[in-house]
Image (tube, grey):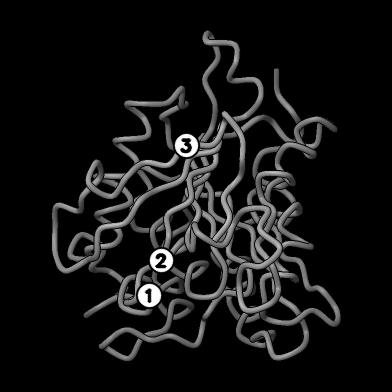
Amino acid sequence: MRLPDSPRFHVIGADEIRPRYGRISPRPIYVYLPDAARDERRRFPVVYCQDGQNLWDDPDACFGHGGWYLNRIVDELTANGQMEPVILVGIPNSDERYRDYTPRRSFRDVLDHPYANFVCDVVKRYVDREFPTKRARQHTAVLGSSLGGLVALWMAHTLPESFGKAACLSGAFQVRDRAGQSFTEFLATCEHQSVQVYLDCGTVGDGLALTRKAAAEYRARGWRDCIDFALHIERGARHNERCWRDRVWRALSFLFGPAKV
């Protein structure tokens, strides 16, 4: 794994941010600051990203598809005025990725979920303490793909006091909790929330029908296109990092654009 060679990139060792609840493996986190952080008076929104080891400009990462190049994409979008500067936080997956990113008994039992507790109560608190963040929920996003996208949506809806934005690329909407409920069925029981949501998927083996079903449920619950909801379907795209790299800019510009001074 090759990490960005930049003074704006920080590696926080696993011993500094150890989980405090449940069965979950310790792991480092990666923090990438915007160039504007040179101004010590400024504070910035934060994007908490799942599968954090796959996000960076590493051409050899991720099963032959390369990393997301998210650090370069964010720098380019910011320089072009398509989004405001943000802090990226990459949280790597573990060998128990499925267990970390899926519910146990129920989609409603987030407070009993070790990974969600780790992100909210350990990682976010550490980042807010050590870096120039805007801490309020409206400035805080969760992002991921596949299972990582599913857990991002789930945390945004069940921990709305912490997260006000969520991006789910190629969401694993086929997953069910132990009660047999899918995320879309869980969403159907929820009232509209002040959570800005971005969904997307490809058309080749990427769960298109289930993504459209989730999108329909968002709209039925009161989310409004181009206001607090966006859906993008990428024709010909598959379920891999290259395709997520090609369209993650849409999620970022929707959630954090246009640029704010």
Q: Quadrant of the N terminus?
A: bottom right
Q: Which residue is found at the position 22% from the left and 63% from the top?
A: 114
Residue 10 - label: 3
Q: Which residue is found at the position 38% from the left and 71% from the top?
A: 101
CA distance separating discs 2 and 1:
6 Å
**Of marks 2 and 3, which one's residue comes earlier in the chain?**
3
Q: Is residue 41 left or right of residue 115?
A: right
Q: Up-down: is 57 above or below 5?
A: below
Q: Quadrant of the C terminus?
A: top right
Residue 206 - label: none
Q: Is residue 26 left or right of residue 62?
A: left
User: Is the C-beta separation of discs 2 and 1 under 8 Å?
Assistant: yes
Task: Between residue 226 and residue 104, name the one nearer to us.
Answer: 104
Residue 247 coordinates in the image, percent (x, y): 77, 61
Q: What secondary structure is marked by label 3? A: strand
Task: Between residue 99 and residue 135, name the one nearer to us.
Answer: 99
Q: Which residue is found at the position 60% from the left and 34% from the top?
A: 86
Q: Amino acid at mark 2?
A: Asn
Q: What residue would you read off at disc 2?
A: 93
Residue 121 coordinates in the image, percent (x, y): 24, 45
Q: What residue would you read off at disc 1?
A: 97
